[in-house]
Amino acid sequence: MQQPLRTIETSRQVPTCADVVVIGGGIIGVFAAYYMAQRGLSVVVVEKGRIGAEQSSRNWGWCRQQNRDARELPMATRSLALWEQFAADTGEDTGFNRCGLFYLSNDEEEIARWARWRDFAKTAGVTTHMLSSREATERGRVTGRSWKGGVFSPTDGTADPGKAAPAVAAAFMKLGGTVLQNCAARGIEREAGRVSGVVTEAGTIKTRTAVYAGGAWASSFCRQLGIRFPQATVRQTIVRVCGVSERLPDALHTARVSVTRRGDGSYNLAISGRGRVDPTPQLLRFAPQFVPMFAKRWRNVFPGGLEGLRGGHETLARWRLDAPTPMERVRILNPRPDAAAVRQTCERAADLLPALRNTGVASAWAGFVDSTPDGVPGIGEVAELPGFILASGFSGHGFGIGPGAGHLIADLVTGAEPIFDPKPYDPARFRHSAWGKVADF
């Protein structure tokens, strides 16, 4: 069963040259292209499948500051304003809504962590409200139970994963940009040691700057270029239900299950952090660097199956530029949902919210979340290949911070003053151990 996704018509004509070629048509790639086109650059986006068809349309849709790691909070804060500005400037509908995010808990330790984050957030100018037991129970009355406490973050919100990336791509094309769907980038040409072109299955586009925003495919693509980028993917599952008789909170989180309202009145259900790790050659290669991450998440991350091998995105193989690559054999990563997760998600949701007890599963899907050893993305020019800008490893946070990441990439490419400090995202940090530095989220 597929996730909802808007279809857009794009070009079939491959330009011979461009100022910048963006590889990957997810939320990061299209926002980067949009902001570069705003500055007058000629930009081409090449996408092996459909715009937004992988993790950019398979996530919760949360656009949050709440509980962000300190390294990501500046990007999250600026992204919220950029979501609003994008809609005002373009008229395109991403479904963005500052509905606020609502958290409930009966775990005193969890509530204490939220309170500590609230104290930190004040120093960054972020507003979040701790809720007393009475306030949490009243605001969470749709659950029909009492709560020890909660959080409401009024300036956070959600956007629609099925609309957002296509909407940004459409706005980018109105600025004169080119989008190529079903056109895989096979590799990079070099001249005098730097990027000189992007080789696609439909021909080579001459350029001196390539932005790689290929999500789960990033590490295997970088391997072709002699670049070591440690990345592992976690397969996560979402369930969609329709026909809910009562209006539920737009975005509700509990430790057992989380619920997000979609614009059509349906609800997406998921268990925060739960996922399967499918064994692949790439995972085995980078396993030592991910020990701290998996040690911190072990309660929700389980051994997987063959979906990672079927996808082909974590291969260690080398491929030729004049023959089909794994990306052309698998245009869109569409892993099977975890049946146990679907069942448990529905059970937990029905237990939490009586209004969901008589609903059935309308659809369910899974996606591969591209993760780094420290849970913070790698964004920046790679020293080994001047002109190659990496933007990957968003660790399940990329959708909400997509506008900020795209703006930062445009800043780096054009030499403008960065919208926020890029240093925490420098890919060079992965040359060192991530022990003790795993993100809190």
Image (tube, grey):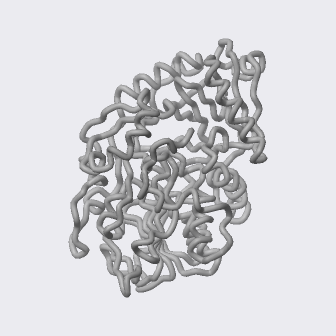
Depicted 139 relative to depicted 432: above or below: above
Q: Position of residue 299 (x, y in %)?
A: 43, 27
How many labels, in total? 0
Depicted 226 relative to depicted 131: above or below: below
Comparing 41 with 69, the one in front is 69
Q: Which residue occupies 50% across, 54% down?
A: 377
Task: Name which quarter of the figure residue 204 lies in.
Answer: bottom left
Q: Which residue occupies 75% across, 28% down?
A: 130
Q: Is residue 137 left or right of residue 227?
A: right
Comparing 8 with 32, the one in front is 32
Could you tell me which quadrant the N terminus lies in?
Answer: top left
Q: Which residue occupies 44% across, 63% down?
A: 24
Q: Is residue 48 visible?
A: yes
Q: Which residue occupies 50% across, 63% down?
A: 29
Q: Position of residue 322 (x, y in %)?
A: 22, 76
Could you tell me which quadrant the C terminus lies in?
Answer: top right
Q: Is residue 319 left or right of residue 368?
A: left
Depicted 354 relative to depicted 404: above or below: above
Q: Position of residue 21 (x, y in %)?
A: 46, 75
